[in-house]
Image (cartoon, rainbow, N blue to C red):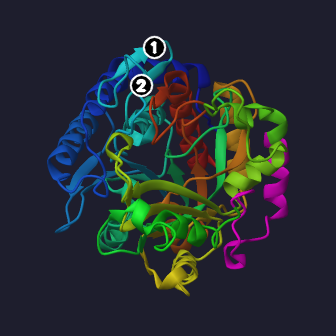
Amino acid sequence: MPTLDAPRALQSSQRIWDQEILPALYEYIRIPNKSPAYEPRWQQNMDRAVALIEGWCRKQPIAGLQLEVVRLPGRTPVILMEIPGEGSETVLLYGHLDKQPEMTGWRQGLSPWQPIREGDKLYGRGGADDGYSSFASMAAIRLVQEQKLSHARCVVLIEACEESGSTDLPAYIEHLATRIGKPSLVVCLDSGCGNYDQLWMTTSLRGLVSGNLRVDILAEGVHSGDASGIVPESFRILRQLLSRLDDEQTGRVKIDGLQVQVPAERLKQARLTAEVLGDEVWNKFPFVPGARPVVTDKIEMILNRSWRPALSITGIDGLPPLESAGNVLRPYTACKISLRIPPRVDPGAAARVVKETLEKDPPYGTRVAFEGEKASTGWDAPPLAQWLSSSVDRASRSYFGKPPMAIGEGGTIPFMGMLGEKFPDAQFLITGVLGPGSNAHGPNEFLHIPTGIRLTACVASVIADHFAR
């Protein structure tokens, strides 16, 4: 079976990254193309990012490449690239180009919109999540063609609202259904890696329910000395309501309908991952001195972040900054809820039970409202075909020097859930460069460049093996 010449592919991937991808990523990082959920006037900067990626991709020496920026009215655009191949099958490669907002806390000398390279790391918002994916996908196909190996027809789809929950994507999937076809292999480069030493496959993703919870008790603020003890404090009521969702001592979500039984295969993968990563399961996070994780068992940590629900409060309103906080009983308190839900939990049903749980029987007759924003489905990978298992193993050993690993991720990629439903027989290679310290969505996000180079070659190898099987 013809396979990719690994040393040659790695050398070529290194050259393409050094000479072509990194310069483009520098320009991409400079564009503040925040996702629509975080920037109502998103269009101008998004168009700049689309134009940059479109121009780079059009220049690629890939036989038969056809590229179109597709724009449906009132929606973010998508970039669709089609590369003819041999045989009747299709490989779909997916990524996104929109970004999370700036976030505070970038260390001195770094900025979300200024690319800074320090050794193997390229800092800046969106480089690792997920701006590199467009360039790496095209480079992988290029590596296969450089060695004159056959490949199936390839479709590259790059969306522009993934960080907003991929709200526009279903319309594009329907609109482009005949052009996308029925992929037998889906490659997604928007995920993470447990370390930078081997190829990591994502085997599951959590879903998401998010929205705004608001508690109103007064029509206007009043003197706290006059009213406290008579008027219930809105923040305390908010705390009571949040305790309906999770146990504040342990973080365990209380709603039974948001729990699932972890499959035996995923338990086995969690044990293996804990053995390989050791303390890196938790110490990759920037804990303050003396702080510790929720649990001490590393297997439980892995399962907590991949197969169990978890509540986070990601924003708050109704509280003035400390320097202007007077002795006032405030009229309301509101917070943004981000509730991760396990794979196999229906997000619509989850959103409904969360709303019902929070709004029923409001304490003190308070006005309580939960307005949902996102309800994204999780995903659990189908069983791995033998050819893909062998291909991934060979790729990881060839380009990283170690066997591959499988891990469930705690984040959400809505597109995977959509594709899993639409193409239940497809095989999935979900992977990425978001490893220890890369800190997507937070400050000091970085792309680990050697991992990007090796990962590009791994994808090329799998694409070649997909056809050769």
Q: Residue at x 33, y 56 (%)?
A: 161
Residue type marked 2? Tyr
Q: Nearer the viewer, residue 308 or 87?
A: 308
Q: Going by the image, does 38 lie left or right of 229?
A: left
Check if residue 262 falls in the magenta segment. yes
Q: Is 283 left or right of 52, judged from the image as shown? A: right
Can you identify the residue that label 2 sits on? Answer: 123
Nearer the observer, 30 or 379: 30
Q: Decide whether residue 387 is among the magenta residues.
A: no
Indicate the secondary structure of the residue bearing disc 2. strand
Image location of residue 63, percent across then percent down: 32, 40
Q: Position of residue 54 (x, y in %)?
A: 23, 42
* Circle 2 Cα neighbour tier, 10 Å, few/some/many (<14 / 14–19 / ≥20): many
Question: Quick check: 327 left or right of 197?
Answer: left
Of pointers 1 and 2, the one earlier in the residue sequence: 1
Q: Is residue 245 above or below residue 35?
A: below
> Are the residues at dot 1 and dot 2 in contact (C-beta closer than 8 Å)?
yes
Amino acid type, residue under disc 1 in the picture: Glu
Pick the quarter of the image with the N terminus. top right
The segment highlighted magenta reads 248-273
How many discs appear? 2
In this figure, which residue is indicated by the disc labeled 1?
118
Q: Position of residue 367 (x, y in %)?
A: 42, 81
